[in-house]
Amino acid sequence: MPDPLAQPQIRPPALETRSIDKWFGANHANRAVSLSVSAGTIHGIVGENGAGKSTVMSIVYGYLQPDGGEILVHGRPVAIRSPRDALAAGIGMVHQHFMLVDPFTVLENVLLGAEGGVTLSAGLARARQELTRLARDYGLEVDLDSPVGDLPVGAQQRVEILKALYRGAEILILDEPTGVLTPQETDHLFRILRALREQGKTVIIITHKLREIMALTDNVTVMRRGAVAANVATRETSREQLAELMVGRKVLLRVEKTPAAPGGEILRVEGLRVADAQRVERVKGVDLTVRAGEIVGIAGVSGNGQSELLEALAGMRPIAGGRVFLRGEELSGHPDRFNAHALRRLGVGHVPEDRQKVGLVTSFSANECAILGFQDDPAWNGRVLLDRKAVAAHCAKEMEAYDTRPRDPELPAANFSGGNQQKIVLAREIERNPHLLLVGQPTRGVDIGAIEFIHRRLIALRDQGAAILLVSVELDEIRALSDRILVMFDGHLVGEMMPDEAATGDGECRLGLMMAGAAG
């Protein structure tokens, strides 16, 4: 008979960090970070860029070593000096960029590094049996004999989860798990994570998508400037409260805009074909138009030709066929006018997808980056040399207008955060009032406060009469900013939707099917 006076046993947290400190030179990346993740829950970690969330999870997984503090797993202190130690402690991690060998099959990828036994055939047989069970129990269906490189992104992610579970993970960390997934793949992932929770596993997700935090997690830790700002039960908070905790001020999470009033045609593309450096055709006969005063968004899973399309329209990549018209005049077939330098003079701005490799020279000062592409403008040049005083005044003015921090025009671009680097690029391209702005991934790697600012600037430019062609893998961003949505799959434009339609359940489903090439 149970003792009525006996105290109920308290289950220790699955994972606990106590006063974790980490320095990178003078940068105090983690400041006494203490967090507790209850067993059998889904726990979210959110924060701005540089808040320290990925750093502390990298310490938990053994990629980094702390300068102070300790880690406990199920109430017991553990020394985690490498990912192997983490796996031995029951901790697995699925990275934002998958760590798979494309030519290998799913089975071979899962077994790689954990073959076991003297002969490979014996290990393969045992692995096949165990993986079949795991796939059945957790909804991780995937063809074990398919080469990983032939699988869609969502299936590759399931392979990563299978790898971790096969190695005995009871605690699973996922870093930005939905960044490259279609809506259907995201829904499938969420079902998998809930199934893991129901089977007693513990899941930690690092994400900047507050809507997903609210939909999926039981508890959430908010980090700001390297420290824990709050630990809250998800049901007791809201997206707005989390955003304020992350940034330290109120943040507008919706994009406020009036209906578009499109004017004349600015860009027209007919039958455009573009190949990559290996001569593989990536854009396959695309037709589109963008008018003054409208934002046309291109939705799609990364790698379906969007990057090559933007680069070709910006004059950075040759076209293999088709015609391009700007303000009614054909540019294709005229190399003296259809190149990056000439297009800038014709009023085409370009915010590239990779700001560090293409948008900036990171060793240059902010001053110099603020005039890249326009350095021969008479406003910046004296009789012989660059007028550095004029350039500095110009950069300082743009830094003030765009709230770029720190406001030091002489600081190398490499020393600014991702969000502030993006502001340097945006200011340079927007403040010249382009007729056409080509924008790739405007808020990639940018924190929530800077996202709000960037969205407002793009809407303001639209309202001034500019035509904007927007490429983003963030569906919420595409829906919020676009006046028309085009969907790209395998180099083709496969459909068009209006944002209001895409915001409905049926519309989002159809949008996701188009992104996956499964519509129609």
Image (cartoon, rainbow, N blue to C red):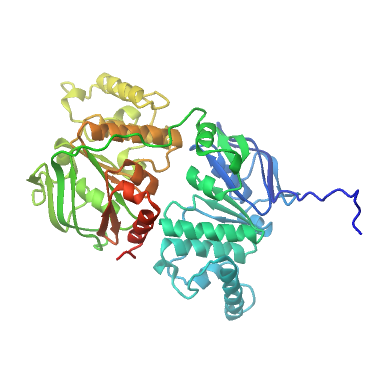
Residue 26, percent from left and from top: 55, 31
Q: Who is closer to the viewer here, 93 or 505?
A: 505
Viewed as shown, does residue 402 lie left or right of 324? right
Viewed as shown, does residue 248 lie left or right of 473? right
Tell me the quarter of the picture where residue 371 sits. Answer: top left
Q: Is residue 226 above or below residue 179?
A: above
Residue 246, percent from left and from top: 52, 34
> In which quadrant of the rendered image does the N terminus lie?
bottom right
Q: Is residue 497 above or below residue 48?
A: below
Q: Is residue 376 above or below residue 12?
A: above
Residue 58, percent from left and from top: 58, 47
Looking at the rendered structure, the number of numbered marks drawn on it comes to 0
Measuring 10% from the left and 45% from the top, which residue is drawn there? 336
> In which quadrant of the rendered image does the C terminus lie?
bottom left
Q: Who is closer to the viewer here, 287 or 355?
A: 287
Viewed as shown, does residue 133 lie left or right of 179? right
Q: Is residue 486 above or below residue 451?
A: below
Q: Who is closer to the viewer here, 130 or 107?
A: 130
Residue 56, percent from left and from top: 60, 43
Q: Is residue 495 visible?
A: yes
Q: Is residue 372 visible?
A: no
